[in-house]
Amino acid sequence: MGVFMRIFLDIAGAILVIASSTCLAEDKPPTVVVASAPGKVVTLSSAEIAAVKAAVAARLKGASAIFDLGMVGHADPKGTVTVCGYVKSPKLTGKPDEKPFLGSFDKGGAFKLEQIGDTDASARTVKLACHERGIELLA
């Protein structure tokens, strides 16, 4: 694939992610975009979204969680799908209310939550890890 085609596809993917996150929260700025890491944006199925939500809720020990700021999946060249996004819950204190999270699906399709950025330092760590895996968390 030519360099120009690759750049075009990266830009088109970023526009798609921004548009889809905007649809999830119409009155809020988009929260996730694709960074320049190798790989591609993937559309998460309903079952995959449910698995992500269940893993985050389990980490929060059953507390209600709100995912209205979106999440995005990115597959690396080896096929590993990383999911990053934001969650809001009464169990997560501090400002801002929305905390970044990071996890990935294994080859068997099981989702493993790696981290929720519930402190300033861990939020920076999560955002950096997402960036390195191809997802830019904006908020």
Image (cartoon, helix red, strand yellow):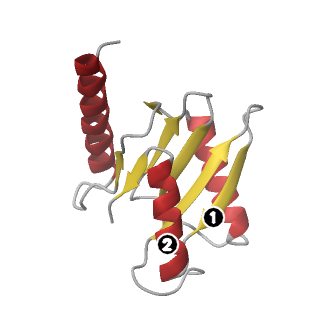
Name the residue tied to disc 2. Answer: 123
Name the residue tied to disc 1. Answer: 115
Question: Residue shown at 55%/75% (left/top)?
Answer: 122
Task: Name the residue type under label 1.
Answer: Gln
Q: Is residue 18 above or below residue 6?
A: below
Q: Is residue 109 above or below residue 101?
A: above
- In the rendered image, residue 88, in percent from the top left (x then y), is placed at 49, 70
Left or right position of 139 against 116: left
Determine the secondary structure under disc 2.
Answer: helix
Q: Is residue 4 above or below residue 120?
A: above
Q: Is residue 102 above or below residue 110?
A: below
Q: Quadrant of the N terminus?
A: top left
Q: Earlier in the sequence, mark 2 or mark 1?
A: 1
- In the rendered image, residue 98, in percent from the top left (x then y), is placed at 43, 72
Left or right position of 134 against 82: left
- In the rendered image, residue 130, in percent from the top left (x then y), is placed at 49, 54
